Amino acid sequence: MWKYISMIMLAFAVSMDSLSVGVTYGIRKIQFPLRSRLVIACMSGTMLLSSMYVGSVLLLFLPVQAERWLASSILIALGIWAIYNVVKEEDKHERIEPLVAAPPRIKVWRFQLERFGIVVQVLKRPTLGDLDRSGSISMTEAILIGFALSMDAFGAGISASFLGYSPLLLALLVCTLNIIFIGLGLKAGNLLSKTKAVKKATVIPGAILICLGITKIFF
């Protein structure tokens, strides 16, 4: 029973970033179509599934008891990193730099570099995903946001494989929770302003990951 509870908690922690993204876009009144939410959810689930299979291969080369300690270490490290990023961003005001259209005579390679720079910016801050300022998240923008959000799922997936979780079940949970959390975040964003209480709540996923990592050492 505890195995399934901890698996749900892990899926919850991995998917919580989608809630933050939903709240941010809800506050800004940016539309988030269902198809774009599905893209993000599928990308997170696919990344998790892929990383779990990577972890299953790594298990072949690890000592019998090493996987539990390694899984716990990864979860704790992910949790600390998540909380660190929240604390680091607390005093910063999020800015969206205006995107400058490429001049007609600009070289292709330079345009590609600029697009790559945009991707890097989105990966660093998924909330900057409305690149075309259309007020709605397109499929292309959803792919960029989904890729950014799925990075945490990769590390969590490797850890989950060491703990013997079902890859398909965990991936399905993550997909479902991503869709639910984005929707809840959008609704909450329409009602809430950016308060310190909302920002402080973003430490919850990191705290959950740390707690899961610690419990896996003893249970």
Image (cartoon, rainbow, N blue to C red):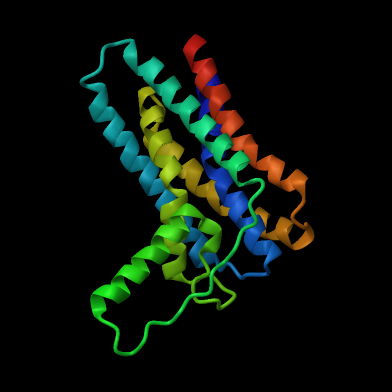
Using the image as rendered, state which of residue 88 and residue 49 is in the foreground. Answer: 88
Whole-percent x, y for residue 124 in the image: 47, 53
**Residue occupying the point 46% across, 60% down:** 122
Residue 42 showing in the rendered view? no
Whole-percent x, y for residue 75 in the image: 47, 27
**Residue occupying the point 25% across, 81% down:** 107
**Residue 139 sits in which quadrant?**
bottom left
**Residue 28 sits in which quadrant?**
bottom right
Whole-percent x, y for residue 158 in the image: 36, 32
Using the image as rendered, state which of residue 194 and residue 157 is in the foreground. Answer: 194
Whole-percent x, y for residue 59 in the image: 26, 22
Residue 83 showing in the rendered view? yes
Residue positioned most to the left: 61
**Residue occupying the point 31% across, 68% down:** 113
Q: Is residue 138 above or below residue 81?
A: below
> How many numbered marks are there?
0
Q: Is residue 211 left or right of residue 162?
A: right
**Residue occupying the point 51% across, 64% down:** 129
In the rendered image, the quadrant that contains the N terminus is top right
Q: Is residue 199 left or right of residue 12?
A: right
